[in-house]
Amino acid sequence: MEAPAAPHNPAEIELTVTSPEQMRELGRRLAKLLRAGDLAMLSGELGAGKTTLTRGLGEGLGVRGAVTSPTFVIARVHPSLGDGPPLVHVDAYRLGGGLDEMEDLDLDVSLPESVIVVEWGEGKVEELTDERLQVRIHRAVGDTTDEVRHVTVAGLGARWASTDLSVLAA
């Protein structure tokens, strides 16, 4: 049996998703691993499925409101319908700077009691916490249906070192 990853090594899994419904289901499964204080950074080209994944996360977390792309409002808060954490959904695509521009959103204040999902957050929100989940979504090359995605989920920091990401493949 392999030893658990050290805190500085990411726990990582690669998955193939073949439809938008499977991407939503991945989000629902991922929601079971998330808790208040977690930051998830989503990356991938336009139309890769970041918002579809986040929609599934919202369903899995049981939050209020339809999860849609917050591109023009930058951030949207979805309160929990139960006793779980709220979901803060951020689209950092139009934000050019790093954490300076993000500070106006008060994500550091929201982080302890919320699950924060940031689309296009690389190079912009890493300073919020050393413990984060990075989700990279890539379209399959040569796919004529444009549905197949390769998704890499990597947990960084002590929070994710002992988390079994293989449950995402179920």
Image (spheres, helix red, strand yellow):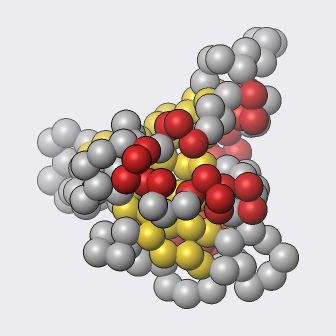
Q: Is residue 39 left or right of residue 112?
A: left
Quadrant where the image shows the N terminus: top right
Residue at position x 75%, y 35% from top? 159
Q: In the current view of this chain or complex, which residue is farthest to the right?
A: 83
Residue 160 in the image: above or below residue 86: above
Nearer to the camera, 114 or 10: 114
Classify residue 90 as left or right of residue 138.
Answer: right
Relative to 164, does residue 38 appear above or below in the rendering? below
Determine the image quadrant of residue 80. Answer: bottom right
- Residue 137 higher or lower than 54, as above or below: above
Residue at x-position 79% and y-position 12% = 3
Q: Residue 108: image x %, image y %? A: 61, 53
For residue 106, above or below residue 137: below
- Left or right? Give the position of 78 relative to 97: right
- Between 76 and 61, the residue placed more toward the observer is 76
Numbered label tally: 0
Residue nearer the viewer, 57 or 103: 103
Q: Horizontal and vertical percent for residue 141?
A: 19, 39
| The quarter of the displayed image where residue 129 is located | top right
- Residue 22 visible at all: no
Q: Position of residue 30 (x, y in %)?
A: 63, 54
Q: Residue at x 44, y 70 (%)?
A: 75
Residue for point 35% across, 76% down? 73
Give whichever of 61, 22 is nearer the camera: 61
Q: Answer whether residue 72 is visible to the viewer in this image.
A: yes
